[in-house]
Image (cartoon, rainbow, N blue to C red):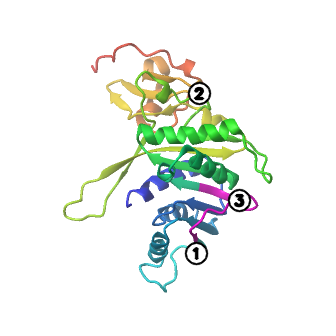
Amino acid sequence: MSTYPTVWYCIFLQIHAQIPEFQPQTLMDFGSGTGSVTWAAHSIWGQSLREYMCVDSSAAMLDLAEKLLKGGSEYGEPYVPGVFFRQFLPVSPKVQFSVVVSAFSLSELPSKADRAEVVQTLWRKTSDFLILVESGTKAGHRLLMEARDLVLKGREKSPLDPRPGFVFAPCPHELACPQLTASKPLACSFSQAYHPIPFSWNKKPKEEKFSMVILARGSPGEATRWPRITQPVLKRPRHVHCHLCCPDGHMQHAVITARRHGRDLYRCARVSSWGDLLPVITPSELPPSPAEDPPES
């Protein structure tokens, strides 16, 4: 689908922004489809990536992805070098990849046991980041939380890589998701705007909603424990509404003003967007929000 490259570019850019020194060497895409992950990854890390492994059960889809890389020709030179295609997921833990991704594939598996087996295999193949993406619905979000908990609680260790895993994004914690345990469960989703192919009937910009989880090996850094903005930021005269997922595992609706929180935080909140981290070390730095929204003037 034409929306996938913009989603993956958004996700890869988030990793690059937080860890600009990260230079992945290899990437594996499970359920690669038309190869949109390869294009997005090459645009961010093209200078360092030397091998892309695309895995898809459909031979026809692999043929299409390869043809797209060659500009529609079967015999042309690929725009992205070092791309390999195979129909089956390699299960040997001897070879790991810097980045392992799976987009909209867990929802296609028939059972929880099948999903668990795939997630465990993908994690064993991961040396740095495992990125899972599903639709921005409650069902898609639950699948990702199921996979997240499987990796974190199981603490399964590769015989060649004993490093534990942690949540790099979007969760600033490893507790139960407060969005799903609320009295009215909500999906933790994000939105990415994109311009569709400009046909006469399809000219307006659109948005793609998706849910994601990025798991990493090693120890979490301090920056990953900032609160995450989980809804569109509402900007009002002299105050800003931010819905935050906090490091203590709770949701908080913060109404930020320059007078109560300082001009720097107020300005930062005003230019922040849905999905950004807000640079507040602890949620206690934000006083509880009033029961009702303050007047706009």
User: Measured along the vertical axis of the image, is residue 134 above or below residue 242?
Assistant: below
Which numbered disc, 3 or 2, marks the residue that appears first in the sequence? 3
Q: Nearer the viewer, residue 66 or 198?
A: 66
Secondary element under disc 1, as helix, strand or loop, is loop
Q: Nearer the viewer, residue 177 or 59?
A: 59
Q: Quadrant of the C terminus?
A: top left
Mark 2: amino acid: Pro
Label 3 Cα neighbours within 10 Å, binned few <14 / some 14-19 / many ≥20: many
Report the residue marked by disc 3. Answer: 96
Secondary element under disc 3, as helix, strand or loop, is loop
Which numbered disc, 2 or 1, marks the residue that appears first in the sequence? 1
- Which of discs 3 and 1 lies nearer the camera? The answer is 3
Q: Does residue 221 show up?
A: no
Q: Which mark is residue 81?
A: 1
- Which of discs 3 and 2 lies nearer the camera? The answer is 3
Q: Are marks 2 and 1 in contact (CB under 8 Å)?
A: no
Q: Position of residue 230 (x, y in %)?
A: 45, 34
Side of 221 relative to 94 (left or right): left
Side of 67 relative to 280 (left or right): left
Secondary element under disc 2, as helix, strand or loop, is loop
The image quarter containing residue 45 is: bottom right
Report the residue marked by disc 2. Answer: 247
User: Measured along the vertical axis of the image, is residue 184 above or below residue 10?
Assistant: above
For the residues labelled 3 and 1, the Cα–Cα distance comes to 19 Å
The residue drawn where x is 60% and y is 61% is 28
Q: Quadrant of the N terminus?
A: bottom left
Q: Position of residue 229 (x, y in %)?
A: 47, 33
Range covered by the magenta-colored residues: 85-100
